Amino acid sequence: MLFQPVPEISLYLAWTAAVVPLAAFGAILVFFRRLPKTAAAISVAAAAVSLICAVCLLVRHWNMDAPLQSAVTWMASGEFEIAVGVLLDPLSLVMLVIVASIAFLVQVYSLGYMAGDAGYGRYFGFMSLFSWAMFGLVLAPNIVQVFIFWELVGLSSYLLIGFWFEKFSATRAGKKAFIMTRAGDTLFFWGWLILLVWGGTLSILELNSGAHGLSSAMTTAAALLVFGGIMGKSAQFPLMTWLPDAMEGPTPVSALLHSATMVAAGVFLMARLFGFFSQSDLAMAAAMAVGTLSMLLSATMAMVSRDIKQVWAYSTISQLGFMIMALAAGGYAAGIFHLTTHAGFKALLFLCAGVLIHAHETNDMFELGRAGARRMKAAMVCMTAGALALAGIWPFSGFFSKEAVMGALAGADNRLWLFCGLAGVFLTAHYTFRLIFIILFPRTEAAGGPGARHGSVSANAVMYAVLGLLTVFTLAAGFFAQGFEDFIRIHGGHAQEGHLASLAHIASPVLAVAGIVAAWMQFGSNASDQVGFAEKIGPVGRLFARRWYLDHVYAWITGRLLDRGIAEGCRRFENKVIEGALTMITGGVVFFGRMAAGWQRAMIQPKLMAAFAVMFGLILILLVV
């Protein structure tokens, strides 16, 4: 038996965690959208209830020895049934707590950050919708339910990214995110259709156990297509350029999207189907290549960006690449642990950035430095703690999860992946502390202290309280690595560390420190000109700043293939075929009408002669008679 039934109390807890945010969304949008304080209270209360339920589930099933599943039939066709329900295993329990915790903390933080915004009530309604979509995705026992909530997550993110729809850049960013993720979702759709038609099952547990009728070739095809959806949702190469533009949304939205929810959903899906992906060596190799390329490219983009939120966005793409690399190397526990620690310190980094932006009304890190952002000591201390975790410095949580990832890569067959991972460690530390040093050591600084944009002391206190909690998590989470690993491995296997593991565990922290030192020499020391080595090489700096020209490639493809190719072909087809056919038909009608009219005119004289003859004959008859 693949699973055990879910106990009734656990089932109630799971459904409550998922449904309460939906009820909050409906209540806010229908009744309380114009009552901002009430809307915020309902949304935060719903998030708190979900968090309590998630924690209770984790504690209740910490020693579980088999997955728990409960499902009811939703649709049936012949012998095939599609069910909806709940799947509880270590992965879903951990992810449920992550999503609930980050959603609750971000919404509490938003009480201060979004205070005074005209769309305050609408904002909290969308946040509740997003939470419901993520909970439904995490608890799904089959691919159909995953796909439904996967698309709802995309819709919710579109609404939040384009929240300030009065700004053209925000609406454009929302549409770009929606379209690019839909490109990946199309592949995902085709992938699960293969599983449905040829495999005969969409159950996650059955797919992971190999209980499907797919050949190895069809398994690889389905896995690669499903991975296409992961590429779009987690902003992996080549569908990666939408994520930096998504920073047009409010900063708390950025923290929510980048830490544990939308973009992490792709990594979660790969972990959710880890057993299925492991059945195809080609799919795992493709995932490794995509993750590695995404990690390196996004790291180079972060090295030259001036926008503080975009630097953290590029960092998110890079860290998601690390997670996918770990999973592709067989390091199931390492990938999930890095996802967990990343959720904490990336939310911390974005929310610290929000405090600085909230006070100085600029995203430019150089402007923040000159405006005196370093005088906001609490925010800078918390952001430095998050930066140390991101760079992988002991004793912060990122050190432990990064070492786990390096251990998994050391056990891979190809040493190239480990060397690329170590290069990523150096680049991560470098671009992270480039940002920190630029803000802490500005070349010129304006007089006076920072000025607040809006909000009150109590609102700012709420924001700082959230930063404090996330900082504590960032400091403490790494020390629970072994317990986390023992718990999460119930679901799947793990990579065996090879002979390079010891070397990797030494080289990784050394390279992280080297990256910080290099950043200090270029951006922190008094002798530095705060211009990076990539920027000093003009073509290289432009290449990185323009995102390796990926957007240019997309624009060219759109312009040539869609506008000048497909659109122009459709225009010509319409003009020559459709309108030509209509012209031919109308011309034929006119021609035959004129011909009939001509015949009618030609027949007038014979008809008159015949009528005259008849009348003449009748007159003769009358005269004779």
Image (cartoon, rainbow, N blue to C red):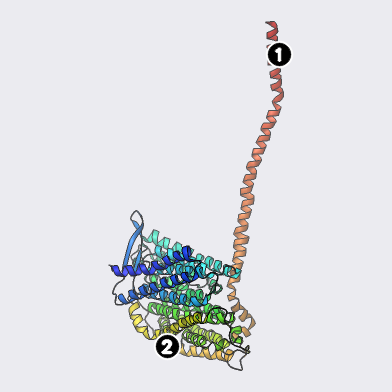
Instruction: Mark yes or no: residue 336 visible.
Output: yes
Q: Position of residue 377 (x, y in %)?
A: 52, 88
The amino acid at mark 2 is His
Residue farthest bottom in this picture: 526
Residue at position x 60%, y 64% from top? 558
Foreground mark, 2 or 1, reads: 1
Taking depth in this image into account, of 545 and 161 the one nearest to the observer is 161
Residue labelled with disc 1: 616
Residue at position x 58%, y 72% from top? 550
The amino acid at mark 1 is Phe
Residue farthest top in this picture: 625
2 or 1: tag closer to the N-terminus = 2
Residue at position x 51%, y 75% from top? 254
Displayed quadrant of residue 401? bottom left
Q: Residues within 10 Å of mark 2 (few under 14, many from 20)?
A: some
Left or right of 46: which side holds 365? right
**Considering the image in quadrants, where does the N terminus appear?**
bottom left
Taking depth in this image into account, of 518 and 418 the one nearest to the observer is 518
Element on which disc 1 rests: helix
Is 43 placed above or below 586 here?
below
Instruction: Mark yes or no: residue 3 visible.
Output: no
Q: Position of residue 578 (x, y in %)?
A: 61, 48
Disc 2 and disc 1 in contact, CB within 8 angstroms: no
Q: Which mark is residue 505?
A: 2
Q: Which mark is residue 207?
A: none
Displayed quadrant of residue 406? bottom left
Residue at position x 55%, y 66% from top? 175
Q: Residues within 10 Å of mark 1 (few under 14, many from 20)?
A: few
Q: Position of residue 554 (x, y in %)?
A: 58, 68
**Considering the image in quadrants, where does the C terminus appear?**
top right
Element on which disc 2 rests: helix
